[in-house]
Every structure is written in structure tokens, then in C-alpha cells.
Image (cartoon, grey):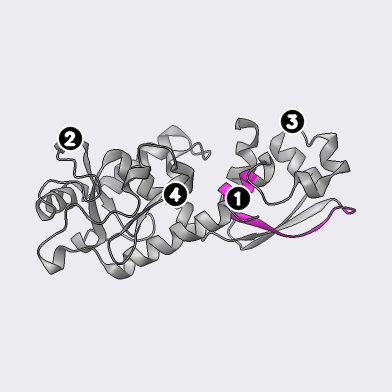
Amino acid sequence: MARYDALEAHLRSLPGDTVRLTFDEINKLIAPHELPASAYVHPQQYLSSTKTQPIPAAWMRAGWKKSNHDFDQQYVELRRVVPLEAITLADDVGDDGLDNENRQFVNIKTRRGQADFRNRLRGAYGGTCAITGSTVTPLLEAAHIVPHALKTDYATSNGLLLRADIHTLFDLHLIAIDADGRVAVSRTLEGSEYAQYHGRRFVAFPVASDDQPSTDELKRHHDLFLAREDALYAN
């Protein structure tokens, strides 16, 4: 819900692993809205870490979970359960407060070297999406396993050739590939057209060992995917 975007963005921006939020601070972050009266009468129900309640759902999307509380003193304490690096690129595709000029500058800087990277991946994967098998060239993109925002690495072993929509889901940790090459699809995508890929192995895979994706980095990305899933579905 849009009214909780500022709360989610605030939590995404924090550098540490723990934070205390008072009810007053929450109210300021969701202004001009505010916590309903029921949150003060039944805070355990309204502010428990469950995606069925809007405010806990917002902090869980940002990678946090409630670790402690004192409802008499009207505060909750949160701990980070999804590493900050796991949501870096998720911020890039949402409304994270960056103005358009800054976003455009970041996008231009990020794409430097991308054309050669994509061409090498197209050759390594035979012009085929590694997950869907799509061969529609305009839709195929070079995906970094270790995000460019964390490390500039245009080695083919740090890349996958993915269809554009799959690339987005991969960056958002809604789709991952484990070290054995099996695809994992987030439970949030159950019932969607993407559920069909869960459990599948690579459709296309480089022949040359130097071009094959790093199993260590795939595992790292997959671990972050699992952490995100655990955070979203924790009770």
C-alpha cells in the first residue's frame, strides 16, 4: 500500500542491523496517515511480524523482522534478516526517493561495459535464455550474479543470459538458481506464469568452463533468496 512506502524506504536506507521505532516515529513515517486506534489497544496483533498486517509487511519487505517490543512504552525493535546487499537492486526499480536525474546518471554509469558483457553472454548461451529457453534476441539481457552495485565484474562467469522479465525477478531475489543449477521461484509468485520454472535446471548452459556461472556466486545469490523468503513468511 502506498501509505507505507515511506516507512519501507526509511528501513531500506538504514545502515545498521537493529533499529528501534516508537509509535510516534511510525506515525511520522506514514503521515498524513497514522496508526489506527486498534494498534494501541491490540498492538501484539497489529504489529506482529506477519505479512497480513500492513506495517509489519512493509518492514518485512525491507528485510527486517521484529525482535523485541515494549507496547507499554510504545516501541518495537527490529533486526535485519535480509542483508542490505540483497535489496540494493530492488531499490533501483522502485520509488526510493532518488530524483530522475540521479537515477538516469546511475543507469548510464551502470551500463558502461554492458554491451560487450551481453554479447559475450549471448555467444556463451547460444542466444538462449538460461531459464526460459527464449531465443527472442531483443528480450535477452545480461544479468549480473553479483550485482553491479556491489562489484564491477563483467566476467562471463558473473553473468547469466536472461529474458528481461526473468532478469528483473532475478535482481529482486524473486527467482534464483542454486549451485546445482536448479531454479527456485518465490512463493509470492505461486499461481503466476513463473511458477512453472520452479525446480527446473538450466535450459542453456555455456560449454566453455570459463564462461560457466560461478557456483559460489550462484549459491550466494540463492542464500539471499532463501533469507528473503524466510523473512517474508516468518510467523
Q: CA distance from mark 1 to mark 4?
A: 15 Å
The correct choice, above or below, for 96 with respect to 201 in the image is above
Name the residue carrying label 1: 60
Side (left or right) of 167 relative to 42 = left
217, 51: nearer the viewer: 51
Quadrant in the picture for residue 137? top left
Upstream in the sequence, badge 3 or badge 2? 3
Report whether 194 appears left or right of 201. right
Q: Amino acid at mark 4?
A: Ser
Proximity of marks 4 and 2: CB atoms separated by less than 8 Å:
no
The residue under the point 58% across, 61% down is 81
Mark 2 surroundings: few (<14), some (14-19) or many (≥20) residues within 10 A: few
Query: Mark 2 sits on what residue?
Result: 138
Residue 122: within the magenta? no
Q: Which residues are magenta?
A: 57-73
Per the image, label 4 sits on a secondary structure element best described as loop
Tell us which disc is closer to us: 3 or 1: 1
